[in-house]
């Protein structure tokens, strides 16, 4: 499931950032470069390397020039367990780790979460999309321009993307996203408004997405855990199988 998780992460980035109308994406043999349209969003302005042997000082200088045109911060996305040589190549070229995030996998279903106060519905239509975007802003302190990419109208007709909203006593309180790739379902951006935290909303959303994934034929779900969310996911049975690094270059 390691490679499947990596492919789900890449698919998420492609759907949310690479396919955005204002983004600029360069596909080539052995790599993909993407400028998301947001100069400061280093986690979404990305280099993905398919062939580590292409990582040379000349290649990295080329990538730096690509992003320099837009005055954009950028990162190289690396999952060492499936790209064993890439991290070391980048470090030797003067790279460093900006931050990392554990990748967690669950086989099967977590324990059910029930509450008469919580109801979960799919995000449908412009009103719910705007509500979901506002919740993401409050939950993650994310700029509205980012949220326009994460929840948008074209996702409604994409069977591989589902957005969920949790209501607490009929008030919009939390959101999450599920993406489906060939062998695994990915869970993304589980965010709760501050006034509704510690009420079981994140766990309820997680259970609903795992339930739906299971009935779609997926035995495994994966996620990239934040420090806040990791204890919740561990209690649900998720285990760490690796990590994703976002690497920068000090000398370019």
Image: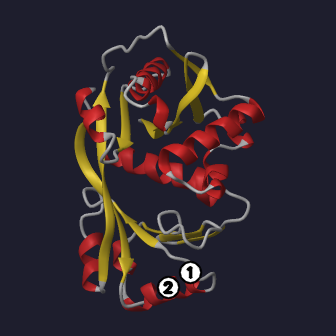
Q: 77 or 55, which lies in front?
A: 77
Image vertical order of residue 89 relative to residue 223, above or below: below
Secondary element type, mark 1: helix
Residue 111 placement (x, y as % from top left): 30, 16
Residue behind mark 1? 67
Residue behind mark 2? 64
Quadrant location of the C terminus? bottom left
Q: Are marks 1 and 2 in contact (CB under 8 Å)?
A: yes
Color style of the picture = secondary structure
Q: 28 or 145, which lies in front?
A: 145
Residue 81 placement (x, y as % from top left): 25, 56
Q: Residue at x 37, y 86 (%)?
A: 56
Residue 163 placement (x, y as % from top left): 59, 33
Secondary element type, mark 2: helix
Q: 165 or 240, which lies in front?
A: 165
Q: 209 or 71, which lies in front?
A: 71
Q: Residue furthest right?
A: 126
Q: Residue at x 44, y 86 (%)?
A: 59
Q: Residue at x 67, y 50 (%)?
A: 148
Res. 44 mark: none
Quadrant location of the N terminus? top left
**Left or right of residue 169: residue 128:** right
Numbered circles on residues, count: 2
Q: Residues within 10 Å of mark 2 (few under 14, many from 20)?
A: some
Image vertical order of residue 87 relative to residue 81, above or below: below
| Residue 182 visible in the current orientation | no
**Left or right of residue 196: residue 154:** right
Q: Residue furthest front?
A: 195
Residue 173 placement (x, y as % from top left): 54, 29
């Amino acid at each position: 499931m390691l490679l499947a998780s990596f492919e789900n992460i890449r698919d998420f980035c492609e759907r949310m950032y690479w396919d955005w109308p204002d983004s600029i994406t360069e596909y080539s043999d052995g790599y993909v470069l993407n400028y998301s349209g947001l100069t400061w969003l280093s986690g979404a302005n990305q280099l993905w390397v398919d062939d580590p042997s292409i990582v040379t000082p000349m290649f990295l200088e080329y990538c730096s020039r690509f992003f320099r045109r837009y005055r954009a911060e950028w990162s190289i996305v690396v999952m060492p367990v499936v790209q064993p040589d890439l991290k070391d190549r980048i470090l030797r070229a003067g790279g460093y780790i900006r931050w990392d995030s554990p990748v967690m996998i669950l086989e099967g279903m977590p324990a059910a979460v029930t509450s008469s106060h919580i109801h979960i519905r799919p995000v449908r239509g412009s009103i719910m999309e705007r509500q979901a975007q506002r919740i993401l802003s409050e939950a993650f302190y994310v700029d509205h321009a980012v949220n326009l990419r994460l929840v948008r109208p074209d996702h409604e007709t994409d069977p591989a993307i589902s957005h969920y909203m949790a209501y607490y006593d009929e008030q919009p309180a939390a959101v999450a996203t599920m993406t489906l790739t060939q062998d695994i379902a990915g869970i993304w951006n589980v965010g709760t408004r501050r006034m509704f935290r510690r009420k079981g909303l994140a766990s309820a959303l997680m259970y609903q997405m795992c339930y739906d994934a299971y009935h779609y034929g997926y035995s495994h779900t994966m996620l990239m855990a934040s420090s806040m969310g990791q204890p919740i996911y561990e209690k649900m049975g998720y285990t760490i199988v690796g990590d994703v690094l976002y690497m920068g270059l000090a000398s370019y």
